[in-house]
Image: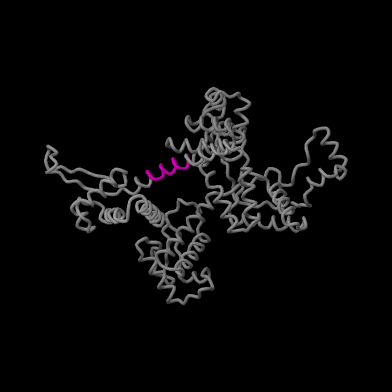
């Protein structure tokens, strides 16, 4: 966890939840697992305020907790990766609109705003908004919203969440299990949710005419008693970020295929990715490659337009396999041929393309030529770079040392004698792509932090 990551996470917490939650979150990011007393002492906040801040962080799945080895108290910590996901919220909402329309967008937006919520609450809030904007009948609105919600659950863009409990965390010590309390539960849609109904904007009707409320409800409201529990009480749902990330990765792969080959190849690649998702047991982004995709079953997933013959399909599969990016790898010859999507190789290709684009925009096309040459040849001397890149010696030297000054390439000295004399030393230039990617990622964190800080300043100035 770098300094820029902590700064960005702190700014995102302050923008979303205010100063006190930001103080608690930043303390946990810098100090790791801490109990209530340590957090209160480190932040200068009272215990009650610290508890409220932790409730907010846990509600939005930003804080984790685990029992201390003694079993007497609980240690709290904050995940910096979870906090950074808040910067992608607009992209999740846009993806929901592309996949499930306006209703899917409203569902995703409401759940992201709440952190975790009941299905009945989400349906009621979204239906209220649609009833006002569309003017449709309440029963129809409720049915459509519920269908979209179930579709997002079945597509695993929404996932079941287990409500956290410190009592269960402390109970793990007694049972001998000291693992962290799980937050996400297994995917399932309880049958009791079929009883959820929506009868219109009841809140608005009650405010306009309090006489519409039942006498028992008015009495409860006057005496401060709680309302009746919903049928899905305790069944919480949250956005499945991993599935959205898989969707973004697939879109990037299809876009890269479209640029390198053509539109038809992109359609074939999109079909293969959909087939891989259906056949894969592990949906996580950590998977190096997909299961073997046999040519005999590909016809089920290929689009009707454009209609591809078996010869055309073979041609595009060979093109994707032989491409330098290695989108596909041939695994088997049985069943017409078995192929696998190499996710790791695709990710490396996308990373390299992004870095090359940055080099082109920041320096020049000639710098990009030198950078690509070093990527291909791995290690070169300055004279070799001049000869292979066909650039004058003086200009090549300037380009190399411009890239070296910004840490896009590295220089290794190999002496031929023990005195390290420059005339008897080899100076080898190379590119360490993972190191360059980490460098650019760190600068991205810094730029995002500057943007968030500037936005908060402008909003405060022109409030």
Quadrant of image for the N terminus: top left
323 or 184, which lies in front? 323
Question: Residue most toward the front?
Answer: 462
Magenta stretch encompasses residue 447:
yes
Residue 347 lies, in percent from the top left, at: 41, 54
> Which of 108 and 343 lies nearest the eye of the viewer?
108
User: Residue at the location (50% across, 75% down)?
Assistant: 307
Q: Is residue 263 above or below residue 128?
A: below
x and y, in percent, of residue 319 in the image: 38, 68
Residue range highlighted in magenta: 438-449
88 left or right, relative to 231:
left
Total numbered circles: 0
* Quarter residue 170 falls in: top right
Q: Quadrant of the C terminus?
A: top right
Residue drawn at x 50%, y 58% as measured from the top left: 280
Q: Quadrant of residue 441?
A: top left
Q: Position of residue 21 (x, y in %)?
A: 58, 32
Q: Is residue 2 above or below residue 146?
A: above
Tell me: 292 left or right of 171: left
Which picture quadrant has residue 331? bottom left
What residue sits 41% from the left and 73% below the top?
314
Specify the principal SS of the magenta part.
Answer: helix
What is the image's colouring? one colour
Whether residue 241 is in magenta: the answer is no
Q: Position of residue 212 (x, y in %)?
A: 86, 45
């Amino acid at each position: 966890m770098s300094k820029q990551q902590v700064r960005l996470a702190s700014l995102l917490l302050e923008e979303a939840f205010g100063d006190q939650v930001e103080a608690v979150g930043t303390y946990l990011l810098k100090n790791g697992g801490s109990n209530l007393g340590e957090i209160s002492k480190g932040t200068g906040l009272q215990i009650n305020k610290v508890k409220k801040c932790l409730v907010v962080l846990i509600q939005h799945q930003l804080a984790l907790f685990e029992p201390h080895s003694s079993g007497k108290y609980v240690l709290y910590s904050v995940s910096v990766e979870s906090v950074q996901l808040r910067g992608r919220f607009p992209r999740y909402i846009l993806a929901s609109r592309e996949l499930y329309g306006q209703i899917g967008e409203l569902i995703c937006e409401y759940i992201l705003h709440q952190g975790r919520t009941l299905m009945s609450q989400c349906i009621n809030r979204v239906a209220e908004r649609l009833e006002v904007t569309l003017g449709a009948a309440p029963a129809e609105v409720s049915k459509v919203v519920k269908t979209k919600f179930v579709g997002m659950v079945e597509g695993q863009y929404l996932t079941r969440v287990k409500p956290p409990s410190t009592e269960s965390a402390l109970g793990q010590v007694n049972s001998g299990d000291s693992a962290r309390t799980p937050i996400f539960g297994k995917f399932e849609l309880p049958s009791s949710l079929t009883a959820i109904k929506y009868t219109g904007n009841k809140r608005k009707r009650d405010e306009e005419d309090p006489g519409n409320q039942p006498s028992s409800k008015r009495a409860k409201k006057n005496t401060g008693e709680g309302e009746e529990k919903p049928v899905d009480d305790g069944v919480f749902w949250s956005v499945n970020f991993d599935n959205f990330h898989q969707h973004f990765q697939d879109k990037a792969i299809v876009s890269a295929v479209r640029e390198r080959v053509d539109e038809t190849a992109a359609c074939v690649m999109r079909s293969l990715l959909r087939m891989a998702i259906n056949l894969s047991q592990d949906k996580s982004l950590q998977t190096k490659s997909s299961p073997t995709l046999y040519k005999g079953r590909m016809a089920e997933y290929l689009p009707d337009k454009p209609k591809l013959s078996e010869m055309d399909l073979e041609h595009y599969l060979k093109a994707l396999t032989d491409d330098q990016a290695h989108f596909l790898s041939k695994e088997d010859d049985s069943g017409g041929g078995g192929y696998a999507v190499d996710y790791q190789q695709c990710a490396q290709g996308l990373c390299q393309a992004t870095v090359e684009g940055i080099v082109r925009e920041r320096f020049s096309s000639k710098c990009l030529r030198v950078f690509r040459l070093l990527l291909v040849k791995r290690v070169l001397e300055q004279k070799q770079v001049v000869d292979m890149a066909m650039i004058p010696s003086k200009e090549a030297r300037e380009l190399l040392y411009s890239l070296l000054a910004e840490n896009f390439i590295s220089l290794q000295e190999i002496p031929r004698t023990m005195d390290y004399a420059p005339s008897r030393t080899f100076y080898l230039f190379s590119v360490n792509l993972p190191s360059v990617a980490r460098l650019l990622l760190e600068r991205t964190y810094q730029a995002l932090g500057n943007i968030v800080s500037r936005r908060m300043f402008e909003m405060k100035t022109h409030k």
